[in-house]
Image (spheres, rainbow, N blue to C red):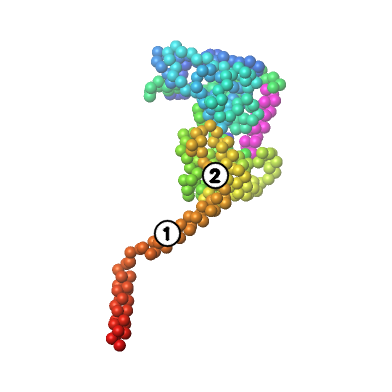
Amino acid sequence: MKKVVGEKSKQSAESPFLLEITPEKLEIPPDGLLEVTIKNPTRKTLYLSCYFDSFYFLVDFNDVIWSQRGDTPSGAHLSQDLEPGEYPKWLMGCAKCDTAFKTRKYRNKKSRSNPKTNIFYNLERPEGILSVNYECGDEVSSTRTFDLYLKEETERYKDLKEAYLKIRQNQKRRERWGESLLNTPFDGTRRVYKKEEDLTRVLDSTDEFKFESPYETPEGFWGKVIANRCSPLNLEAFDAVSDKEIQKIKMEKRAQYFWLIFIVNEEDLQKEVEVCWGTLCTCQMPRLKTREKWENLVKGIEKLETKTERKKALTTPQTVQEKKKEYKESIVNFVVISLEIDQ
């Protein structure tokens, strides 16, 4: 599990951080909300980019359009122009305070209401971070990451901390099944998968399962689809199993979803495709076929190729040697026929 760059509060060395953020310490009450203000004290318009992630808390960016980033429902990103003197106000608080946050279903990929289901949260502290970057043209850029703090650890947060620690243990267990987590600044936490020969063979052999998307690669997408189906729900049950045996179990499970150079719709894998595709435009979403359909298609192609080869053999121009041989044979036949006529 790799650590996000700048996870600890520190300032970019590129240029001084000029934005005024209040309060200085982002300390959030256990049952309330913290109002955070970001002010542009300069005389120039700044391009602001912010990333928030927390196991405990949610953020409300008010009326600014934001998007979920990465594979964690808690990862929220926004970008906006910040005019001179402008100071947007945001709210941060515990997930229990859902009513304080405006519902924007079209901006959410996944439910953010239950921290215990946030199984890919990968920061070292459950309180989380707020990363702020601003740019002014091509010359000025500065970034600062702020740690979030819990003002008081109540029973609710003790329970959440236990869930967080268990999730972190399961993330280490999941690495044995070929899946790890990568934190990237302002782009959230991404699931990363060990390359296996079955999927590599498919993607190297055909474009059938490829697509173009600024949010996901074919390798990452299909890795997620297959991992969701082949990783056990109870990871702890395999603690006593060797890495070699786990690899064997995993590959045996994966085998049912591959045939030749195709991914097949076994056990209705298409449903998993739809879940992993999320809110992306369905116009490019892959549509899987069953093994039977792929077999019929391959047989049809083989028959067509056989017919094409036969037709090609009949219509292929003769070589010089073939023409000479045919000419000699015709002369011999002519002589034989002539002799027979003379007799």
At label 1, the amino acid type is Thr
Whole-percent x and y of residue 230?
62, 43
Of circles 1 and 2, the one toward us is 1
Q: Residues within 10 Å of mark 2 (few under 14, many from 20)?
A: many
- Residue depicted at 50% across the width and 34% down the height: 281
- Disc 2 residue type (three-letter): Leu
Residue visible at 29% across and 82% down in the picture:
338
Q: For the residue labelled by badge 2, is the local secondary structure a helix, a strand or a loop?
A: loop
- Can you say whether 338 is above or below 174 in the image? below
Residue bearing the label numbered 2: 288
| Screen quadrant of the C terminus | bottom left
The residue that appears at 45% across and 23% down in the rendered structure is: 13
Q: Is residue 2 left or right of residue 316?
A: right
Residue 100 appears in the rendering: yes
Give the percent coordinates (x, y) of residue 306: 45, 60
Rendered image: mark on residue 141: none
Compared with 22, 69 (above or below) is below
Q: Residue at x 45, y 58 (%)?
A: 305
Residue 308 got which mark?
Answer: 1
